[in-house]
Amino acid sequence: MTVEYRQKKERASRNRTITLIPNEISFLKSQVLTLDNLKKLSPIENNTSNNSPKNNNSNFLTDKTINADLLETLKYIPDEFANLIIIDPPYNLTKNFGGKTFNAMSDSNYDEYLSTWLPLVCKKLKKNGSLYLCGDWKCTSSLQRALEKELTILNRITWQREKGRGAKANWKNGMEDIWFAVKNPNDYYFDVESVKLKRKVIAPYKVDGIPKDWESSEEGNFRLTYPSNFWDDISIPFWSMPENTDHPTQKPEKLYAKLILASSKEGDIIFDPFLGSGTASVVAKKLNRHFLGIELNEEYSLLAQKRINLAETDKSIQGYENGVFWERNSCITKK
């Protein structure tokens, strides 16, 4: 497989979109694993089963990007490998991903499509692990049906995605879902303290002259609140954001930071079987977790690796500062 470089776009001087530069392609390719690499590195020799053995040495998979077919790659990943799995699969929409089109289908056919890979991916989750599965209004019912066959669903997060100018013959789709599921509802990790949201206090309330449940500062009045399952503080990556790429369905780093902080510890392994432009791996690295991502498209896998490399020195996450998440457009960066 070879990268077909996108025709260079004319971009504004303030445009911060991450793109591939021809003279860096060779180095990025050397960092990304292929299926041939896996066959040479894997301790699972001549494995033709989708049920990979447990407890194999998986160090060769840690902190890696794999450019290969998902089903073929899963054969080389031990079961119970990951503490947290984040999945952003193709939704049931016709969408072009770097020259390869995923076509919308009937609900029954989409259910069948999910059944070809989701049960296999769920086997890679540790016994006390958690999984998040992304979708939109059109495919969310299929996702729920498929997921509840494999794991215990604990919640559905709905997040507001402000992007696009709207539709002329329908309501603009401004929401997406993330299903939250675990292998064992009696044994899973969840740290709500790490995902508090800092909100501006519109009507400060005091008791005996003392702020009640809020604090006053030079920047204004704020309250730390526990998150609900509706998130309205997320910004979709766009041209002036340093995390932006040309991937058509890129998820925001802030969105994944909430999932990773809440459902994993430092040093845990985060697995994304549909890596895309690399957000899950990038955020895992920034938050001191290990990661593994699989991406079929070579260009996207190289973009992901480039972003991972950039995260070596840039640990910032838009909207996350000083250990708390801020409301959209309200974060005050300390100099």
Image (cartoon, grey):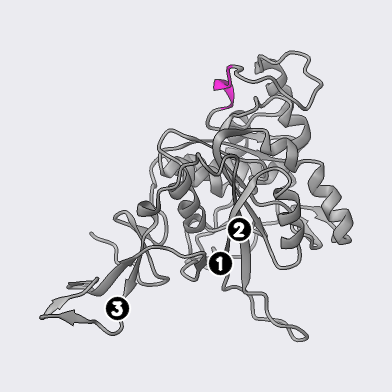
Residues rendered magenta in the picture: 57-61
The furthest residue to the front: 186
Q: Measured from the top left, where is residue 53 in percent x and y? A: 69, 19
Count of numbered badges drawn on the protein: 3
Q: Quadrant of residue 42?
A: top right
The residue singled out by tag 2 in the image is 178
Residue at image point 55% right, 46% down: 280
Q: Measured from the top left, where is residue 235 in percent x and y? A: 50, 67
Image quarter in which the N terminus is found:
top right
State how far apart marks 2 and 3 are (Cα).
Answer: 28 Å
Can residue 69 be seen here? The reply is no
Q: Say left or right for 265 vs 59.
A: left
Q: Is residue 71 above or below residue 263?
A: above
Q: Of label 2 and label 3, which has the lower sequence position?
A: 2
Q: Measured from the top left, where is residue 206 in percent x and y? A: 18, 80
The residue singled out by tag 1 in the image is 159
Residue at image point 81% right, 62% down: 94
